[in-house]
Image: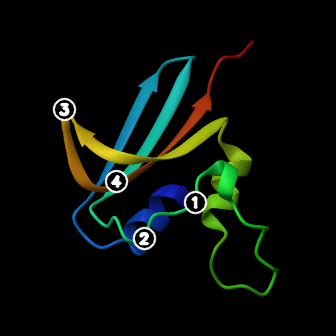
Amino acid sequence: MMLTSSGFVIRSPPRCLRLTHTPDVLLRIEVSDTRGERRPPGPADLAPSPSLLDEAGRDLFLVDALADRWEVRDRVSPGVALPGKTVRAELDLSSA
């Protein structure tokens, strides 16, 4: 939820939310926007967690804690680069 709320509250339009669900296998959440100048860090570049008194900056820490995988990607359409970025988070749904 933090991925989508942060993406829609903070980011400027246009923005896009995409959910992909494969029953019993995977839930993928993608939030895209056209702002390339405010690219968030990826999982390997995440800074230390914010303090308890910080009013912002927890969204990607929650994504990191809850998602099985996540990444920040450049936006692309088949063969064409688009402005902005996409934050993608994946949750494994298998019961095994």
Residue type at the position of mark 2 = Arg
Q: Distance between the residues labelled 1 and 3?
A: 25 Å
Residue type at the position of mark 3 = Gly
Residue type at the position of mark 1 = Pro
Left or right: 65 with respect to 92? right
Q: How far apart are marks 2 and 4 (CA)?
A: 12 Å
> Badge 4 is on which residue?
32
> Badge 3 is on which residue?
79
Q: How far apart are marks 1 and 2 (CA)?
A: 10 Å
Secondary structure at numbered mark 2: loop
Residue type at the position of mark 4 = Ser
Left or right: 52 with respect to 5? right
User: Vertically, is 89 above or below 93?
Assistant: below
Task: Tell me the number on the disc at residue 77.
Answer: none
Q: Mark 3 or 4 closer to N-term?
A: 4
User: Nearer the observer, disc 2 or disc 4?
Assistant: 2
> Badge 1 is on which residue?
41
> Badge 2 is on which residue?
38
Q: How many labels does the image show?
A: 4
Q: Mark 2 or 3 closer to N-term?
A: 2
